[in-house]
Image (cartoon, rainbow, N blue to C red):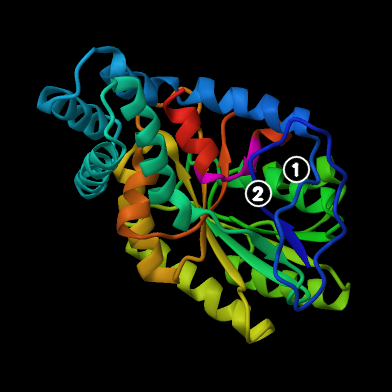
């Protein structure tokens, strides 16, 4: 099996591990060069500057008092961390400060990184490929979230790990969506199943059937972008899932939602709506570069705890990377 998960990078070079075998526990992958990961972490820190700047500014004073906690509460809420996650973080932080007998605000900042890491750890989970062949991954998301682009980048990750991928262009509602996915297929040198003006469910069925016949490791299904309030389109999504199950009774094996990190609490509402309709197994959070609302991941951790497989901070192929709780918390408050 292929496992897409990384621990925090180490300063020394590492060798690429062999793929995880069937039945083994997925181990942290260090297949990418450490230098590449460090470069991406720099982008993550820069991207989260708007979100974390106001939070980090709380710790520039000289006293640990109720005023500090009130300022921190405001900063967390402004970052769209959400009421529940904010209350949890403040309670956890106060307990850590008391236990550590901290007297300096900068020490409190370090303790907040620890609290954030613990809150986000349930979201840190590997995307393991190889238990089924093909593994069918259905990808949903509203228009503008970066769904099709994320599929292209995910294809790049999968191909880099040695997985053979087949793309399904089931986003037949949006103009040029099929052509956009075809460009990604060409860039990644993978096959694509598409029909001009075809029924999304039929395209998905054909792709899964083709993936089985051609022995592909992964079939990635790009579904139509839609708002959760568009009930007829949400029903179309459910139909795609049902039809995919006719081609493979166990499919889809993963149902991913792509959310735009700029949309804050709206992203949380999308997660809830799509999870209710489809039963989400994972998230891809995009456009974290330059947003002031990146704290929504904390809200998701507190209210839904659906794994975040990947986060994106740019337009390059390698700008979509695996989510690491400690890295994210540290970058947020750097």
* 16 relative position to 114: left or right: right
Say if the magenta span includes residue 324: yes
| Label 1 element class | helix
| In the image, farthest residue toward the left | 66
- Relative to the observer, which residue lies in front, 200 or 62? 62
Residue drawn 52% across the image and 20% down it: 46
* 165 relative position to 314: left or right: right
Quadrant where the image shows the N terminus: bottom right
Say if the magenta span includes residue 264: no
The 10 Å Cα crowd at callout 2, few under 14, some 14 to 19, many 20 or more, is many
Q: Position of residue 170 (x, y in %)?
A: 62, 60
* Residue labelled with disc 2: 151
Start-end of magenta stretch: 320-325
Residue drawn 81% across the image and 46% down it: 31
Residue 214, image quadrant: bottom right
Q: Is residue 315 visible?
A: no
Q: Position of residue 16 (x, y in %)?
A: 86, 48
Question: Label for residue 184?
Answer: 1
Q: Please, is residue 264 above or below residue 204 in the view? A: above
Give the spatial CA distance, label 1 vs label 2: 8 Å
| In the image, farthest residue toward the front | 101
Q: Nearer the viewer, mark 1 or mark 2?
A: 2
Q: Are marks 1 and 2 in contact (CB under 8 Å)?
A: yes
Q: Position of residue 291 (x, y in %)?
A: 41, 26
Q: Position of residue 122 (x, y in %)?
A: 45, 58
Question: Label for residue 85?
Answer: none
């Amino acid at each position: 099996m292929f496992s897409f998960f990384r621990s925090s990078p180490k300063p020394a070079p590492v060798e690429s591990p062999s793929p995880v075998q069937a039945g083994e526990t997925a181990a942290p992958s260090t297949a990418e060069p450490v230098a590449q990961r460090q470069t991406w972490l720099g982008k993550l820190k820069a991207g989260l500057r708007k979100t974390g700047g106001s939070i980090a500014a709380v710790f520039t004073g000289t006293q640990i008092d109720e005023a500090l906690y009130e300022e921190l509460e405001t900063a967390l809420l402004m970052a769209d961390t959400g009421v529940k996650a904010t209350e949890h973080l403040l309670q956890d932080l106060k307990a850590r400060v008391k236990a550590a007998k901290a007297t300096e605000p900068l020490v409190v900042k370090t303790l907040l990184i620890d609290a954030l890491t613990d809150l986000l750890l349930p979201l840190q989970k590997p995307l393991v490929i190889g238990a089924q062949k093909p593994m069918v991954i259905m990808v949903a998301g509203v228009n503008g979230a970066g769904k099709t682009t994320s599929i292209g980048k995910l294809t790049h990750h999968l191909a880099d790990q040695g997985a053979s991928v087949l793309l399904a262009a089931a986003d037949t509602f949006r103009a040029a969506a099929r052509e956009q996915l075809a460009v990604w297929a060409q860039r990644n040198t993978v096959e694509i199943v598409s029909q001009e003006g075809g029924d999304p469910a039929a395209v998905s069925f054909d792709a899964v059937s083709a993936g089985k016949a051609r022995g592909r490791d992964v079939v990635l299904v790009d579904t139509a972008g839609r708002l959760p309030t568009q009930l007829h389109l949400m029903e179309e999504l459910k139909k795609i899932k049902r039809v995919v199950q006719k081609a493979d009774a166990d499919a889809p094996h993963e149902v991913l939602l792509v959310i735009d990190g700029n949309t804050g609490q709206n992203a949380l509402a999308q997660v809830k709506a799509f999870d209710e309709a489809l039963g989400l197994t994972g998230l891809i959070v995009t456009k974290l570069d330059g947003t002031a609302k990146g704290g929504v991941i904390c809200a998701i951790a507190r209210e839904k705890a659906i794994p975040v497989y990947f986060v994106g901070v740019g337009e390059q192929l390698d700008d979509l990377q695996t989510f690491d709780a400690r890295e994210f918390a540290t970058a947020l408050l750097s």
